[in-house]
Amino acid sequence: MDHIILEIGLALGLIAFAVALAHKLGLSNIPFLILIGIAVGPHAPQWGVFDFRFIQTESLISFMGRFGVLFLLFYLGLEANLTRLIEAGRSILVGGSIYVGINFTVGFTYGYLAGFPLREALIIAGLTTVSSSAIVAKILFDYRRMANPETQIVLGITMFEDVFLAVYLSLISGIVLSGASSFAGVLSSGGIALGFIVGLIIIGRWATPLLNRVLRISSNEVFVIVVFACLFLDNRHRVLAFEELFRGTVDSASVHPREVVRACLRRNASAVIFAHNHPSGVAEPSASDRAITRDLREALQLIGVRVLDHLVIGSGEPVSMAMLGLI
């Protein structure tokens, strides 16, 4: 047990060092974490009580890593706006097809010219085609680009790659894993794997309303953490529109003043009232709320739009930041 605790502490120390170095250099911590992971492992040295091979905790670290990826992908889903993804469906389809086509062709050509058999060349093509959705989401978050308009296209293309990968793996498994030698055998094995994936998607799609009724879930947005909305007013404070601007984990990285300015210009608004919820139920403006409000006020002053109030909504009465003298 002592060795496990020591190795976990050593791993956390290495991670902290990599993140601190990345922050110092103003870069994403993804490449630094990967380099730290490469440096340690079965072939790493052991200095006294510090064992950089992580033999005792290998299974635990592997489990925690998979768990972390699940939460990162869950965060990716929270930040993705379904409405905007649907609106950008054509662009995502075209861009994703071009991206997949180019990378697949390059990978397959390399495998073929390198003298690999057909099956190995197809595997190389698959490796060069897809990207890691988790890594893409983490880099976008690190560089505070989650609220940028092009981010939805980027996330959409990574999701398109994930769908392609699921279909491609189901087909390639019929060639590599099943040992089928005939064309009919390959199609049969690939069809079974593909049918399994499509079946799960269909079951998940049709089972959602049933689960909602069984679990008494009244809204599909049960996992939404925060919704940031805006009430647009004219110069006589008459309502022009009410629009949800952001959803997910709203902080200074995801509420982008540029998007709010663009929305105000689109609505020809003269004043605005912001509102967002606190999942904790405590409607007390946080330091982040004050910073976001300050940044939005400064940005909107440049185009002559007044921020009248920012409402923080919890389990009780909403709290007005204007009433608290914070605006």
Image (tube, grey):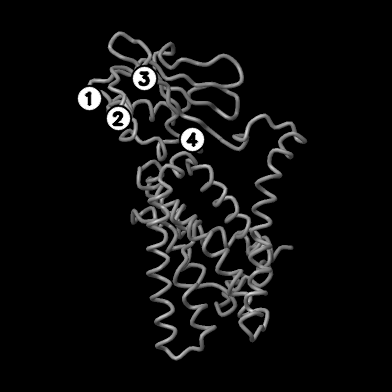
Quarter of the rendering containing residue 109:
bottom left
Q: Could you say which is closer to the camera, residue 85 or residue 297?
A: 85
| Callout 3 amino acid | Phe
- The quarter of the rendered structure image containing the N terminus is bottom right
Cα separation, mark 1 vs mark 4, equals 25 Å
Q: Residues within 10 Å of mark 2 (few under 14, many from 20)?
A: some
Helix, strand or loop under label 4: strand
Helix, strand or loop under label 3: strand
Q: Which residue lies furthest to the right in this view?
A: 214
Cα separation, mark 1 vs mark 2, equals 8 Å
From the image, tell me which residue sits under label 4.
247
In the rendered view, would you say 249 is above or below 301?
Answer: below
Of the numbered discs 2 and 4, the one sitting upstream in the chain is 4
Please give left or right for residue 149 compared with residue 265 in the image.
right
Give residue 99's mark.
none
Give the residue at x 55% y 27%. Answer: 278
From the image, tell me which residue sits under label 2.
261
- The quarter of the rendered structure image containing the C terminus is top left
Cα separation, mark 2 vs mark 4, equals 17 Å
From the image, tell me which residue sits under label 1.
303
Mark yes or no: residue 287 visible: no
| Callout 4 amino acid | Arg
From the image, tell me which residue sits under label 3.
232
Of the numbered discs 1 and 3, the one sitting upstream in the chain is 3
Cα separation, mark 4 vs mark 3, equals 18 Å
Of the numbered discs 1 and 4, the one sitting upstream in the chain is 4
Give the residue at x 42% y 20%. Answer: 310
